Amino acid sequence: MIAAMAAMVLLPIEVSDAGWLSDLFKGPSKQAKSAKQAKSPKQAKSPKQAKSPKHVASRKPVTSAKPAASPKRRNVKLAALGPVALPPAALKPVAAACDPSKLRIVLDVGHTAESEGAISARNVSEFVFNLRLAKLIEQKLKAEGFTETRLLLTEGKARRSLFKRVAAANDLRADLFLSIHHDSVPNKFLEDWEFEGKKSHFSDRFSGYSVFVSRNNPDFKTSLSFAELIGKEMKAQGLDYAKQYSQPIMGRHQRPLLNKETGVYRYDELIVLRKTQMPAVLLEAGSIINRDEELKMNSPERREIISSGVTAAVKEFCEPRWAMLGPL
Ligand SMILES: [Zn+2]
């Protein structure tokens, strides 16, 4: 089934789906590679392998002798050794404390004013939702001391804008890249209704957030750690993730689910995740084609919940982390 899914990725993008997740695609150039990878069961990460930095940051004695999946960032500083009550088999700081005032986070606002992404059940463009939420996340991160947070607004046509945002993030030498989106469904699920006298489309079938990472990102491990933190925080806020991406009914939009607790999926081909030279994650904050969920996504309460969750995830990501390297 995975091979079938990978093969489907080779198909050209349907024009009818443009504006939804599919316009985030890269063309088929690297597909052969990802298809090959997808076939290898060994490489599929189980949820247990996905260590979150929080877990690694534990100062309690741990039995695992595995080095931590620690981010290698340009501006990391070595953490000072922690409290004296450390276990005898010393904990070594491997990557360490990140300074919130130096962590360069790029918040990528999905789509552009010209190429607006999905259209909600009530005919509002995804770009409007993305911008509003990303601005609130930016505000909260800055308030928490992440003063180097940058909102990335891109102009122009969809596909071109993807390379522009990647170039911008790479030029900024960002430490972390988070792309903000709102979800829709493949066209085959759309149903008709009338909203304010206008023929409109909806699908109440699916709902929820989802988090995506690409194994083709140069730092997949750290990307995954950050994605797990975001998923964990969304869950802690009482939100459910979108289950449909793991189901065959999604056809070529089906994705490997990396963690069935947190809702982290693999989506290797996404340009913004694989061309960025820093850990990168894409968050679909919720569905705007689902009529009930659109109303929620449009509420200040839901924006508050999601932006707080993302901020908490970044804070955890930035905490000092420790790893057991065995006896010195
Ligand atoms: Zn989008």
Image (cartoon, grey):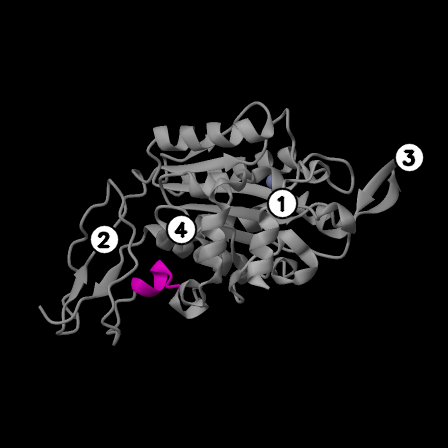
| Residue 173 coordinates in the image, percent (x, y) | 32, 33
State how far apart marks 3 and 4 are (Cα). Answer: 44 Å
Q: Residues within 10 Å of mark 4 (few under 14, many from 20)?
A: many
Whether the residues at callouts 1 and 4 have beta carbons within 8 Å, the answer is: no
Q: Nearer the viewer, mark 1 or mark 4?
A: 1
Mark 1 secondary-structure assignment: loop
Quarter assignment of residue 243: bottom right
User: Which of pointers 2 and 3 lies earlier in the amino acid sequence?
Assistant: 2
Q: CA distance from mark 4 to mark 2?
A: 15 Å
Q: Position of residue 109 (x, y in %)?
A: 54, 35
Q: Earlier in the sequence, mark 4 or mark 2?
A: 2
Q: Which residue is mark 3?
A: 197
Image quadrant holding the N terminus, namely: bottom right
Q: Residue at x 36, y 39 (%)?
A: 277
Residue 209: where, in percent of width, then height? 60, 53
Q: Which mark is residue 95?
A: 2
